[in-house]
Amino acid sequence: MTKLERNKFEQYGLSEEVLEALSLLGYEQPTQIQEEVLLPLLNGKHIVAKSQTGSGKTAAFAIPICEKIRWEENLPQALILEPTRELTVQVQQEVFSLGRKKRIKVADVFGGFPIDKQIQTLRQKTHVVVGTPGRVMDHLRRESLKLNQVSHLVIDEADLMLDMGFLDEVKEIIARIPKGCQISLFSATLQPEIKELMEDHMDEAIQVEVTEDEERLLEEVGYLVSEEDKFFALLDILITEKPKNCIIFCGTREMVNVLFQKMRRKRIFCGLIHGEMEQRERLKNMAAFKRGAFRYLIATDVAARGIDLEGMSHVINYDFPTGRETYVHRIGRTGRNGKRGKAISLIGQEDRQMLAMVEGYMQKTLLLEERPKPTKEQEKAFWQEQRKRPTPTTGKHEALNRGITRLSIGGGRRSKMRAGDLVGAICSIPGVSMEDIGIIDIRDSKSQVEILNDKGGLVFAALQNKTIKGKVRKISR
């Protein structure tokens, strides 16, 4: 029996392409939220799901979307709304990976990047759009995004959307989708405004609530420290705990920058992320951290909501959070999916009142311990380790790239290049068919095309002397 045949997702009657993608991504057993919502979503029902981050909800709504996409349709058939840019990129990657074997094209749209490039992308065949409400509304006003073929709308992290003031944009987007469009709403909490949204737009919605597993393998501990001693306390914790990977949370952007510089002066290799950084730099740092290019990410709470950081061993609250919910979201980055994790908080005298509020909110007392004192052997081992950069990992999505070659072809929109021109030239090569062609992306002066099924070398060689739209084009991998 093959791995694919053993996949528990077979019970939902999914296509071979989606099942193969699930297996390559390591999804073999549905999570609780997936078990609750997959069948209703596949059957076209509205869903309101209350679940925490890390429960597998992205795949829960992405699998039915990928299953139902009609490849031949050029306009978007699904719209997924996310509250932040980082979540938009993360969800775009997940949907793209799940739909890779069906050649589903997924666009992401958000602020901080030129809108003109996004408009060019949306002019081409696009099956799914993932975006922040503000940028989605920009495209709708410019008529660069058309919703008349959208049959599934996802409102993800609805409570964070509300907190960030996106509710009006969400309502306007709902007003523009076709009548009868299936709506899925996912939220950690169901506040009155969200319930009102459900009542107004989601008749007969199936409500699902997934509570966190009480056996979650998360250890929480606090250390009492003075402000002057805080940085040295952090060093002692890193030396004694030896985190595999760790987010260190600070309360302000300024403190992120200060701590980052202190760590670098000690020659501790780390990264940072906060709201004042250029969007491209934020995404670059987050991607590098996910790959394991560095062990420590210093962050403001922009990284505390929704971001999927797989296998996080530790979370450290360098600055104790100023809100009860913020504490919960921060520590939720570790101890997920059956893996052990540890959340450590540095607590000053001024944090005692908020600590009491957090303990009341969570209905448990945080264990307060004396700060650990590393041995000389531990210190020596730690500083030796800092001289070596971690070896980046490939990540779960890389398995889907095997057998795929991306070719860059000279000539794009300015030379009136069309997808049909590329398909015709490639399919005329002996041994190559339409099934061997993946995503095609035509830009102003060049085009990119994915060649599947290990035929990249064959196509690359054949195109060196083959004319495309009357000319031999420059081809590169």
Image (cartoon, rainbow, N blue to C red):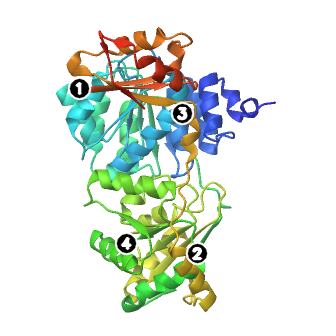
Between the residue at mark 1 and the residue at mark 4, the CA separation in whole angstroms equals 39 Å
Q: Which residue is mark 4?
A: 250
Q: Which residue is mark 1?
A: 144
Instruction: Point out the tag, 1 or 4, that comes first from the N-terminus.
Output: 1
Between the residue at mark 2 and the residue at mark 3, the CA separation in whole angstroms equals 34 Å
Instruction: Say which element carries label 1.
Output: loop
Instruction: Point out the tag, 1 or 3, that comes first from the N-terminus.
Output: 3
Q: Quadrant of the N terminus?
A: top right
Q: Give the residue at x 50% y 74%.
A: 387
Query: Are the residues tagged 1 and 4 within 8 Å (C-beta)?
Result: no
User: Is residue 384 rendered to the left or right of residue 443?
Assistant: right
On residue 297, the disc is none
Q: Which residue is mark 3?
A: 98
Front residue of 131/5: it is 5
Q: Which residue is mark 2?
A: 242
User: Is residue 343 rendered to the left or right of residue 7?
Assistant: left
Between the residue at mark 3 and the residue at mark 4, the CA separation in whole angstroms equals 34 Å
Q: Give the residue at x 60% y 57%.
A: 336
Q: Position of residue 272 (x, y in %)?
A: 37, 65
Query: Are the residues tagged 4 and 2 within 8 Å (C-beta)?
Result: no
Instruction: Determine if residue 209 is in view.
Output: no
Instruction: Say which element carries label 3.
Output: helix
Between the residue at mark 4 and the residue at mark 2, the CA separation in whole angstroms equals 20 Å
